[in-house]
């Protein structure tokens, strides 16, 4: 027996239905019943040629233009592309040219992301960039309309689109719940009948191996539009009590300078505990997956009604707050891995008006993930310096 939707062959994951005299897959039952060996049926969605072009608030930088040209060249060769770009380098802008070309050819385009909040944000950005087309968001609370010229959805919602997309852009492939989830990986593979573009700031070893083997093309972009290097975190390893003391001092200095701070903690309980402890001298708020009115809390933080948010990894990606600094309490906790730490420090310095900032990692021991995070950031910055040096040599006149 095999489930044609999720690829399950484990008999323990199949159940027998005596009323219909067949077996069905329990592994992907959340996406609707799928009988064993039942073919995965295609769903017919609308497609049309759209003579569209995208509009940006700011022109692409020379480095971004070079990356866009490389992506277009690989797509002409029929290759899937891994876009390895630093946090804040403009990954979304890099794929707009590919979306434009696909829509002009009458192809179906999907954009899949791990998190619901980011789906809504990307949908708004795409609607502004492509005012001539219909952009739809498909995620929890937004499933009434599931078809449009450009479909932005969570990874889970890809089950609605078997054999649908000629071009599938997959963002945050390094994030929960997609990373390491064979069920979602299989559903995503079945949803695309054409090419894929993968976006990430932290590719895993498996994807890099595919690049080495020539199965996947890769385009790198480590330069942010403002040209400043990525922020390297300051690391302090000490006992938990002193971590709180360092965090308090960090927050008081930022409050005096009117700099907003995101303080990342391992658990929801930690977020509430820190809020109760620090609310006496800073305007703080706990922000977790259980928080109500998430959009309002973020809007208030943008408006500087809070000095800091104590948050879980829910805010590690997909959010841009101008001029923010970050601190991570107990960053040696197992909930923080290399990818999440890179994403967290990537919240700093994203604004052209405030391209620098500070990141503080507080831990009892400097573990493997912390070391690899710092090493990856320094490698990106070194690549940026080397590229700038090469450009300088290229522009120097012959003596």
Image: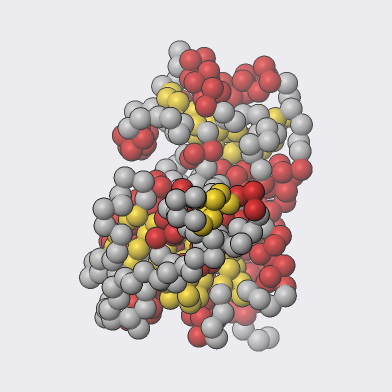
Q: Is 134 placed left or right of 368 in the picture?
A: left
Q: Residue at x 28, y 73 (%)?
A: 46
Task: Provide residue 9's location: percent of width, then percent of height.
Answer: 64, 59
Q: Is 151 placed left or right of 338 in the picture?
A: left
Q: Residue at x 68, y 86 (%)?
A: 399
Confirm whether residue 248 shows in the render. Answer: yes
Confirm whether residue 172 shows in the render. Answer: no
Q: Residue at x 68, y 78 (%)?
A: 214
Comparing 61 with 178, the one in front is 178
Q: Is residue 145 above or below residue 307?
A: below
Q: Is residue 105 above or below residue 217?
A: below
Quarter where residue 345 is shown: top right
Task: Provide residue 375's location: percent of width, then percent of height.
Answer: 72, 51
Quarter where residue 96 is shown: bottom left
Q: Residue at x 26, y 53 (%)?
A: 144
Comparing 17 with 384, the one in front is 17
């Amino acid at each position: 027996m095999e489930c044609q939707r999720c690829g399950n062959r484990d008999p323990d994951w199949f159940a027998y239905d005596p009323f219909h005299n067949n077996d069905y897959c329990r592994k992907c039952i959340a996406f609707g019943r799928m009988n064993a060996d039942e073919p995965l049926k295609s769903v017919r969605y609308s497609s049309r040629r759209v003579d569209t072009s995208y509009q940006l608030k700011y022109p692409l930088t020379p480095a971004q233009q070079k990356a866009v040209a490389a992506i277009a060249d690989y797509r002409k060769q029929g290759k899937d592309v891994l876009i390895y770009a630093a946090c804040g380098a403009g990954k979304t802008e890099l794929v707009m040219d590919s979306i434009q070309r696909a829509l002009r050819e009458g192809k179906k385009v999907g954009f899949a992301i791990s998190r619901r909040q980011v789906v809504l944000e990307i949908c708004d950005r795409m609607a502004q960039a492509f005012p001539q087309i219909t952009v739809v968001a498909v995620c929890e609370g937004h499933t009434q309309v599931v078809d449009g010229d450009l479909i932005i959805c969570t990874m889970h919602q890809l089950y609605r689109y078997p054999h649908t997309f000629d071009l599938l852009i997959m963002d945050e492939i390094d994030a929960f719940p997609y990373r390491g989830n064979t069920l979602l990986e299989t559903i995503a593979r079945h949803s695309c009948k054409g090419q894929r573009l993968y976006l990430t700031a932290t590719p895993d070893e498996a994807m890099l191996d595919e690049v080495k083997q020539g199965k996947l093309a890769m385009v790198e972009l480590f330069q942010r539009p403002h040209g400043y290097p990525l922020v390297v975190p300051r690391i302090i390893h000490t006992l938990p009590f002193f971590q709180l003391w360092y965090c308090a001092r960090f927050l008081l200095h930022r409050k005096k300078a009117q700099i907003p701070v995101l303080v990342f903690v391992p658990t929801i309980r930690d977020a509430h505990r820190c809020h109760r402890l620090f609310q006496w001298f800073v305007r703080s708020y706990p922000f977790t997956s259980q928080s109500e009115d998430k959009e309002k809390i973020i809007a208030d933080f943008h408006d500087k009604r809070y000095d800091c948010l104590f948050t879980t990894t829910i805010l590690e990606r997909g959010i841009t707050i101008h001029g923010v600094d970050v601190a991570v309490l107990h960053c040696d906790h197992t909930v923080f891995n290399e990818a999440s730490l890179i994403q967290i420090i990537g919240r700093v310095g994203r604004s052209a008006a405030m391209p620098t900032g500070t990141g503080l990692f507080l831990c009892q021991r400097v573990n493997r993930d912390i070391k690899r995070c710092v090493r990856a950031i320094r490698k990106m910055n070194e690549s940026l310096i080397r590229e700038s040096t090469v450009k300088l040599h290229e522009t120097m006149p012959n003596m």
